[in-house]
Image: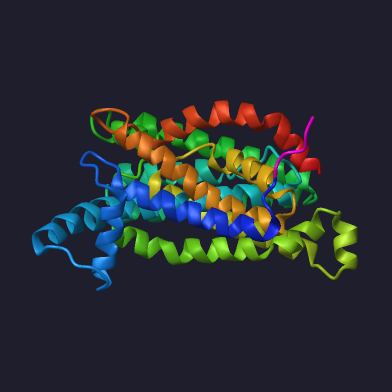
């Protein structure tokens, strides 16, 4: 079987960054009122004083591009990048290619927090804060259970499974007591994932923390490569294994919980995208992590474009990622396994 094609080392990341920028431009152009991509580019040039547009046309484009489409495009890039790089980081830390951000119960915890915020408050910010807090609490419980029984990676995984099951039960309980006419449909819609409610002010408030987490994980690529050789080998290289492991888990958990705060539950990105990135970049985490972030943003922009334009009404993006993720994962599964081992 031929080896998977990999772009040249120096060309991969610039290519993915350009591809991501092109996907963002196309996403800004697509919608119920489609625009030529060149006109979108001309609008931004006009905003920079490098081109001219009629004032009436510029006002119309400002409303369409800046007020309506830009928030969800930025949210899609942030959420996709965060889920993909956290999935790649979790897979590296646990040395398991089937691990995803839901491993330590973070998504279940964040979802139950959002549901609690909706039932007992209804305030959008309370929901976001509760989602983040419960996501972190779920990971703390999972890590605590793992540490209680020796702190090995297997026990950490089992602790995450137990924590995820606990918060799934909490979510079911919240849905059971929720108002069946208003609150329950809102919870179900939240769990399906959506970028429709993303606003620029929400993106601006959450983006700094998410970007810090993405940059931190991206900068730990060579350290994770050393960890892949084994704990004893990494320690001989002077790497504080436990500190690095918990730092990666903490950063990945933080940005995963923030994605739920911003867009609800969106599955498959953290599992599928790292495998696709591994086919392009190889197993080395120094290139794999940033490649996963770029591809995650591109994948979610694609899913959002389908969600917005598939029919007369918008389809929840979580459904689209499920429909895209399952066949795509089956297609890359055998080659992804080859990429993981070498």
Residue in front for this viewpoint, 4 or 285: 4
Residue 172 point in image, percent of width and height:
44, 31
* Residue interval drawn in magenta: 1-5
Quarter-of-image position of residue 312: top left
Q: Is residue 280 left or right of residue 113?
A: right
Which sits in the foreground, 91 or 170?
Answer: 91
Give the image's coloring scheme. Answer: rainbow
Closer-to-camera residue (133/278): 278
Query: Would you say residue 45 is visible in this rendering?
Result: yes
Whether residue 334 is situated above or below residue 143 in the rendered picture: above
Residue 338, compared with residue 6, is above or below; it is: above
Q: Per the image, is 4 magenta? A: yes
Q: Position of residue 209 (x, y in %)?
A: 47, 65
Q: Is residue 297 one of those drawn in magenta?
A: no
Q: Position of residue 254 (x, y in %)?
A: 53, 57
* Residue at the (19%, 67%) spot, across then down: 52
Q: Looking at the rendering, in which quadrant would you find the C terminus?
A: top right
Residue 225: percent from the left, percent from the top?
78, 57
Left or right: 103, with 72 as reference point: right
Q: Is residue 237 left or right of residue 66?
A: right
Work out which residue is located at the far left of the displayed protein and give it. 56
Q: At x 25% / y 61%, what residue is drawn?
A: 43
174 shown above or below 221 = above
Identify the main secondary structure in magenta.
Answer: loop
């Amino acid at each position: 079987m031929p080896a998977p094609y990999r772009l040249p080392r120096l060309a991969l990341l610039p290519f993915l960054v350009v591809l991501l920028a092109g996907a963002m431009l196309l996403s800004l152009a697509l919608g119920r009122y489609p625009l030529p991509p060149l006109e979108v580019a001309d609008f931004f040039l006009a905003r920079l004083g490098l081109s001219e547009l009629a004032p009436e046309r510029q006002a119309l484009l400002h409303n369409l591009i800046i007020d309506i489409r830009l928030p969800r495009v930025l949210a899609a890039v942030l959420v996709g990048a965060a889920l993909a790089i956290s999935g790649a980081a979790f897979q590296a830390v646990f040395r398991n290619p089937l691990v995803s951000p839901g491993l330590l119960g973070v998504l279940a915890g964040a979802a139950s927090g959002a549901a609690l915020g909706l039932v007992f408050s209804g305030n959008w910010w309370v929901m976001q804060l509760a989602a983040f807090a419960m996501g972190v609490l779920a990971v703390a419980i999972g890590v605590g259970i793992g540490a209680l029984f020796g702190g090995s990676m297997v026990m950490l995984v089992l602790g995450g499974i137990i924590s995820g099951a606990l918060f799934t039960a909490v979510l079911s309980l919240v849905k059971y007591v929720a108002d069946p006419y208003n609150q329950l449909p809102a919870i179900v819609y939240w769990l399906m994932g959506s970028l429709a409610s993303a606003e620029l002010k929400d993106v601006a408030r959450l983006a700094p923390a998410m970007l810090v987490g993405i940059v931190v994980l991206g900068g730990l690529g060579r350290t994770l490569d050393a960890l892949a050789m084994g704990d004893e080998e990494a320690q001989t290289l002077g790497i504080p294994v436990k500190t690095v492991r918990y730092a990666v888990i903490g950063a990945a958990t933080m940005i995963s919980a923030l994605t739920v705060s911003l867009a609800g539950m969106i599955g498959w990105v953290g599992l599928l995208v790292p495998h696709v990135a591994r086919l392009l970049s190889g197993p080395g985490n120094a290139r794999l992590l940033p490649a996963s972030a770029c591809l995650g943003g591109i994948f979610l922009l694609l899913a959002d474009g389908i969600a917005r334009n598939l029919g007369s009404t918008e389809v929840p993006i979580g459904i689209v990622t499920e429909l895209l993720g399952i066949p795509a994962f089956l297609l890359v599964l055998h080659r992804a396994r080859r990429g993981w081992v070498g």
